[in-house]
Structures are given as C-alpha cells and as structure tokens.
Amino acid sequence: MGKAVIFDMDGVICHTNPFHSMAFKEFFAKRNLFPTEEEFAAHMYGKSNSYIMSHFFGRKIEGEELLILEDEKEGLFREIYQHHVNPIDGFLEFFHGLKKNNLKTGVATSAPKANLELIAGKLDLFPHFESSMASEDVNKHKPDPEVYLKSASNLKVKPENCLVFEDSFSGITAGLNAGMRVVGVLSSHQKEELPPCHLYINDYKELDVKTVIRLIED
C-alpha cells in the first residue's frame, strides 16, 4: 500500500497568514469593520471563510452570499500574495527528499482551488503531488476528516499509513479524526494552543525523511 505525506497549505507550505490578514483587513475596512490582531488570531487563523465572516458580521453568512464575499476576499489575497510566494524554510528540500524516497505526497487545503493553483503552481509542486484537494472538493470542512480521508483514497494509502502536516487546531483535529499521524507546524500557533501532535516543528530544516518514515511506522 505504501506510505504518504499530506500537507495542508496555509501556514504549512507557505506562511500566508500575514497576507490573509492584509486581505481581510482590506475586505472588512470597505465595510467599516476594523478587527484587531487579537481578534484575527482568535477567529481567523485556521478557520473557514464562512466562520470568519459570520463571526465578524455578527450573522450567518452562507450560500450565494458566502460565495460572492469569499470570491472577493480570496481575490484580494491572491492579488497581494502573488508577489510574495515563498515556502517555509527548508520545505522544498524536505519535500523533494520525500519524493526521492518514494513517498507519495498530497495537499489538502480548506482554501479555494485558485489559491492552491497560485501557490503550488509557483513552487512547481503539482507534478509531484499524487493528490491535490481544495475547498471545492469536499462537502465538510476541517475539523471534519473528509479532506484527509479522500486524500488517502486518492493516494491509495490507508489512513494509518499517512502523515499529515498541519498548523491549526481544526486542521490537526481533522488529521487525527482521520486516524493519521500529525506533525504540528508552529507557524501561527504555540504548541499549547494546539491538540497533542506526534511531533512539532518550527520549520522543515529540523526534519529529515528518516524521522518521517519512523513516525508513520511507529
């Protein structure tokens, strides 16, 4: 069956959160809303657009309205971020090391496909992914394990033979709910703010492929 490593994208492949903050600030400022950095930390990082917008607008944002608003905000993000696509330290070397060791790889993000295409496209990752999933590919978002279970199915690997890299509470929970081992990437949160993971890293320079294989086999 083989082994696989599945990456979330925001905060895991690239440190995009500061740029999502910029996009949301612009998005909310147009509507005379000015959330603080503390409010963003509590109610934005790792949360779905539906949750974020519903929280700050103080009413449920869903259906057609959500699609229109999400499109506007993510368009702002891509406009800002296209000039800054830059992987977390050591990511590319680590990623290509996995491929040299015949590990399957996938990406499972709650972001829209257009964001995934921007980031994975600029970093030339698509030829190396055996599975790529974005928000349009699932019905239930993290912390529901759907995106990770579908990824395992695409990769033709059992969930228990998959290792997930995640940076948010809901993402880590989704990986654990899928029955996978999880590495917490401490790009946007402290260890204490996250569920217990099998390992924590600040960046990929701290990690080698042997450790990954050992984590999956443990």
Image: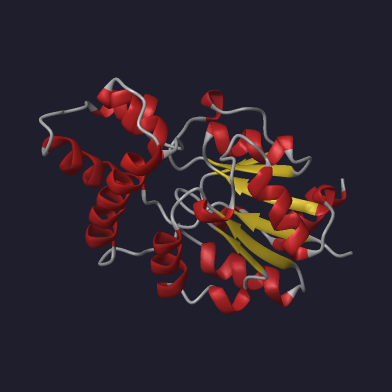
Residue at x 73%, y 63% (from the top left corner): 154
Asked if residue 198 shows in the view, the reply is: no
Q: Quadrant of residue 187?
A: top left
Q: Quadrant of residue 140?
A: top right
Residue 167 higher or lower than 208, as above or below: above
Q: Nearer the viewer, residue 213 or 85?
A: 85
> In the picture, which quadrant includes the C terminus?
top right
Residue 23 higher or lower than 42, as above or below: below
Residue 168 higher or lower than 79, as above or below: above
Point out residue 85 in the picture as x, y percentages from the top left corner: 34, 64
Residue at x 77%, y 74% (from the top left corner): 102
Residue at x 15%, y 28% (from the top left corner): 33
Asked if residue 140 shows in the view, the reply is: yes
> In the picture, which quadrant includes the N terminus?
bottom right
Judge from the rendering whether residue 140 lies leftward or rightward of residue 118; answer left or right: right
Residue 190 higher or lower than 93, as above or below: above
Colour mapping: secondary structure
Q: How many marks?
A: 0
Q: Quadrant of residue 131?
A: bottom right
Judge from the rendering whether residue 169 lies leftward or rightward of residue 35; answer left or right: right
Judge from the rendering whether residue 161 lies leftward or rightward of residue 127; answer left or right: right
Point out residue 104 in the picture as x, y percentages from the top left corner: 73, 67
Q: Residue furthest top?
A: 58
Q: Nearer the viewer, residue 87 or 57?
A: 57
Q: Nearer the viewer, residue 57 or 12?
A: 57
